[in-house]
Image (cartoon, helix red, strand yellow):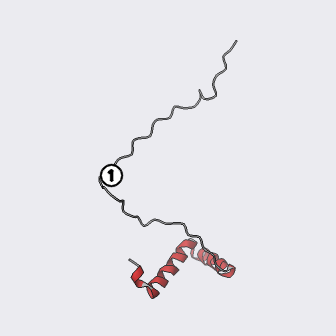
Amino acid sequence: MSVKKSRFEQLQVLKPSPEPTVSAKVGRPEVENVLESLSTQMHRDLKIALKQASAREQRKQYQLLEEAVTDYLRRSHSDLLK
């Protein structure tokens, strides 16, 4: 009578991942300027125009929005920008 092999016998043995290196810095890590998710609403015609403009310029929609918000903040609230 043959012995049924375990279905897990064919899996490769995984190597343990290396230990994470500890940074020399102590305390709170610096905040990086990374992209964060933003959810908002806008009128349909503006949304369509934004999509068309981003296609014309071959840029992402978030890049156009970021540029528009930056321009607005420079004009109206320059003290908020670093």
Helix, strand or loop status at disc 1: loop
Query: Which residue matches tag 1?
Result: 23
Q: Is residue 9 left or right of residue 29?
A: right
Q: Residue at x 41, y 79 (%)?
A: 81
Picture coordinates of residue 64 (x, y %)?
54, 76
Q: 10 or 21, which lies in front?
A: 21
11 sits left or right of 78 in the view: right
Q: Nearer the viewer, residue 77 or 61?
A: 77
Looking at the image, residue 37 lies above or below residue 52: above
Please state, as top left, top right, bottom left or bottom right, where the N terminus lies in the image.
top right
Q: Is residue 59 visible?
A: no
Q: Which residue corresponds to the image point at 39% horizontal and 64% vertical from the top-left?
A: 31
- Report the side of 75 relative to 22 (left or right): right
Q: Percent x, y for residue 7?
A: 64, 28
Amino acid type, mark 1: Ser
Residue 42 % position (x, y): 64, 78
In this picture, is 57 found above or below 7? Answer: below
Residue 57: quadrant of the picture? bottom right
Count up the numbered dots: 1
